[in-house]
Image (cartoon, rainbow, N blue to C red):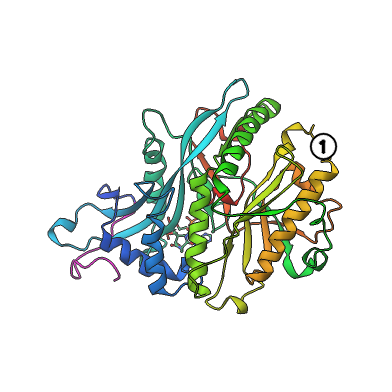
Amino acid sequence: MGSASKGNTYTLPEATAPSLVLTHPTDTEKHRTWTLNHREWGGALTLEEYLKREPYLMSVPLSRDGGMTHWILTDSSWSPEKGEQRPVLASCETIRKRVMVAAPNNTEVHDGIAHGIGSVFTYPEFRGKGYAGRMLSELGPTLRRWQSGDQDSVCSALWSDIGKHYYAKKGWTAFPSLHIEFPVFDNQTQLNGEGSKAKANVSPITYDNLEPLCKIDEQLLRNNVLRSARQTGKTTVAFTPDYDTMRWHMYRDDFITSILFKTDSPSPIKGAIAGSKEGRRVWALWSRNYYGSNPTETVDKNTLYILRLVIEPDAELAPGQPPSQDVRDAFAAVMQMALAEAAKWHLGKIDLWNPSDTTKLLLENSGLQHRWVERQEDSIPSIMWYGKEDINNVDWIASEKYCWC
Ligand SMILES: CC(C)(COP(=O)(O)OP(=O)(O)OC[C@H]1O[C@@H](n2cnc3c(N)ncnc32)[C@H](O)[C@@H]1OP(=O)(O)O)[C@@H](O)C(=O)NCCC(=O)NCCS
C-alpha cells in the first residue's frame, strides 16, 4: 500500500467515518503525493524535474507567503508526530486569488477573496471509495472562511478535468467552457506578415512593461463588472487580472520552457500590444504548454494559451457595435505576433478561452483560421458561491485562462 503502514491490521475507513479529517500534509507527505501524481500532472517534465517544479511554484508571486495551501484528507487516529505514516486518502491544493464583484444595484465594485482549487487527487489504491468526495465536502465550507479576513470568501473555483458532473454534484457549478482554437500553421497569411502588422504599432510585452498594463486592465475590468451587473441584472464576478496572477503563469511557463529547451533564457516575449494610442489599444498576455519532453514531436498538441485579451475601447462600444478599423488592425497585429511566437516555440495552436462579444466581432472578417471548441471533459470552469445569491443569478465575466490554476 502506498501510504498506510500500520501492519496488516489497518482496514480502510468508510468515507463517512468521523475520524477522517481535512488537514495539511507534512513535507514528506507532499513529496509522496507529488511522486504519485506526476503521472497525471507532470506533463512534459520527468519525475525529478516535476519534484523541483512543485516546490518552486510555492515560491513565486501569488502562491508564495502562504498564498498556496496544501490539503489532505487523512485518518486522525494516526499520529505523524509518533512517526506513524498516516494514510493520505485524498489531496489537493488551493491558491488565494483576488476577485471583483458587484450586485446589479451596487455603485461600487467590492474586492474579495476567492480560492482556486487544483490537483484534486486520490492515490490509485484508494480510488472509488468516496475519499475525494469527502475531502471536497469538508473543503467547500472550510474555504468560505479560509484566509479571508473578517468577511467570507466570495467563492471557490476549480477547472474540472473529469467533466461537468462530478464537481457539480459536490456544489461547484459548471460555467461555460468555450474556446477558440487558432491552428498556427494554417494561418500562413498572418504568419508571413501579410496581416495588419504594418498598420498597427505592435510591440512585445515583457516583464519590463507588464505591471502597468495589468493595473490598467484591472481598472477596465472593474468598470466592466459594474456595467455588466447593471445590464444583466445579475451579480457579476471577475478574477482580478493582476500582476501576481500573470507572473504565476509566466514563471511556471519559464520553468518548464527552460528545461525543455535547455536554456537559461526562455522567451522574454510574454504578450503583444498594438494600437494607435492609449485608450485604443489591444493586448494579449500568454503562456506556453507542452505535452512531451521533446517539443518538436508534440507540436500538434503544444498550445499557446492567451491568458488575457484586453480591448481597451471595449467599454465605449454599445452591445453588438463592431469595433472600428484601428481596433481591428490592432487585434490582427497582436494575433500575428502570437502566431509568430507560437511557430518559433513549436506550439501548433493558440487557444483563447471564453471570448467576449467584442472579440467575436473582431474575429469576423479577420482572415484568421479558427474553430470553436466547447470543452466537455477538461478545464471546465466551476464555482462554489459563498454569497447569498443563487448561483444561477451569478455571472462570471472574463473567465479566461489567467483565472485557471
Ligand atoms: C478523480 C479522483 C480524484 C476521484 O477520486 P476518488 O477518491 O476515487 O473519488 P470518489 O470516490 O469520491 O468519487 C468517485 C467518482 O469519481 C468519478 N470519476 C473518477 N475519475 C473520473 C473521470 N476521469 N471522469 C469522470 N468521473 C470520474 C467516478 O466515476 C465516481 O463517480 P460517482 O461518485 O458518480 O460514482 C481520482 O480518480 C483521481 O485522483 N484521478 C486522477 C487525477 C484527476 O483526474 N483528478 C481530478 C482533476 S480535476
Q: What crowding class fits label 1: few (fewer than 14 Cα within 10 Å), some (14-19), or many (20 or more)?
A: few
Is 242 contained in the magenta span?
no
Relative to residue 66, is residue 232 depicted above or below? Answer: above
Q: Circle 1 — which element?
A: loop
Residue 262 or residue 206, whichever sits in front? 206
Q: Which residue is mark 1?
A: 320
Location of residue 14 (image quadrant): bottom left
Per the picture, the main secondary structure of the magenta-coloured stretch is loop
Label 1 CB, ligand 1: below 8 Å? no
**Numbered circles on residues, count:** 1
**Vertical relation: 379 (above or below) 49:** above
Amino acid type, label 1: Gly
Query: What residue is at 38 percent from the left and 55 percent from the top?
Result: 58
Left or right, 64 with reference to 296: left
Q: Residue at x 57, y 23 (%)?
A: 108
Q: Residue at x 20, y 70 (%)?
A: 8
Quarter of the rendering containing residue 318: top right
Q: Nearer the viewer, residue 365 or 47?
A: 365
State the residue at coordinates (79%, 44%): 327
Whole-percent x and y of residue 223? 63, 30
* 158 or 149: nearer the viewer: 149
100 over 134 or under it: above or below: above
Give how far across and how far down residue 13 sits, in percent.
28, 57
The answer to whether residue 282 is left or right of residue 210 is right
The stretch of residues the image draws in magenta is 1-15
Residue 383 is situated, as x and y percent measured from the top left of the image, at 53, 42
What x and y, as percent, mark residue 196? 82, 55
Tell me if residue 53 can be seen.
yes
Q: Quadrant of the N terminus?
A: bottom left
Magenta stretch encompasses residue 5: yes
Where is 101 relative to 31, above or below? above
Residue 169 in sight from this viewpoint: no
